[in-house]
Image (cartoon, helix red, strand yellow):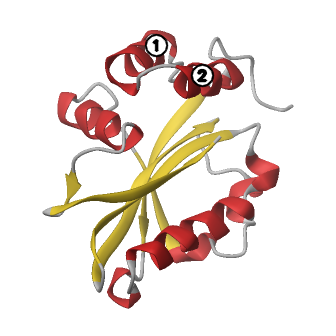
Amino acid sequence: ELLPPSSLNLEDWKRFYSNNDTKPDAMNWFWDNFDAEGYSIWRVDYKYNDELAKVFMSSNLIGGFFARLERARKYAFGVLNVYGADNANQIGGYFVIRGQEVPFEVYDAADFESYNFVKVEDIKDEAFRAALGDVFAWEGSQNGNAFADGKVFK
């Protein structure tokens, strides 16, 4: 492990997220324990939303991506959601990643290139925090499209 120690135990976060209501409990725990030196948060969006058809197929696409991220489990937690309806949907969400860069275990995944990973610079921004809470809770909308389905990488 080349990264410096972190006060955030990612496994504790995954367990708390899984066993508690996302809002407000898990999100409060997350922000009380988040270590911005040891972890980074990334906005993740699928690049080819115009090619998506059925919501269930988009959800399966996320599942396939997550399956190929298996080696990254100890370094990452993420939620990707499908927003919209059949023939008009999009994929987006957030990843929490150990360190300040996307690690090899993530960018080596076969379909990594199909997603835009953009580091969130202002994690104190209230609009961002609300959006992160919505994504993690499988709520809200994206670009006017309502939440349809979601998957968690943990």
Residue 2 higher or lower than 56, as above or below = above
* Apparent side of residue 86 relative to residue 72 in the rendered image (left or right): left
- Confirm whether residue 43 shows in the render: no
Q: Residue furthest right?
A: 1
Q: Do labels 2 and 1 touch, CB within 8 Å? A: yes
Q: Residue furthest left?
A: 144
Residue of label 1: 29
Which residue is drawn at the image coordinates 41% and 22% (left, top)?
21
Look at the numbered disc 2 and give the secondary structure of its residue. helix
- Kind of residue indicated by mark 1: Trp
Spot occupied by residue 143 in the image (x, y as percentages of width and height) = 17, 63
Residue of label 2: 13
Which residue is drawn at the image coordinates 54% and 18% (left, top)?
35
- Locate residue 108: give its quadrant: bottom right
* Apparent side of residue 56 relative to residue 98 in the rendered image (left or right): left
What is the number of the mark on residue 130?
A: none
Give the number of marks. 2
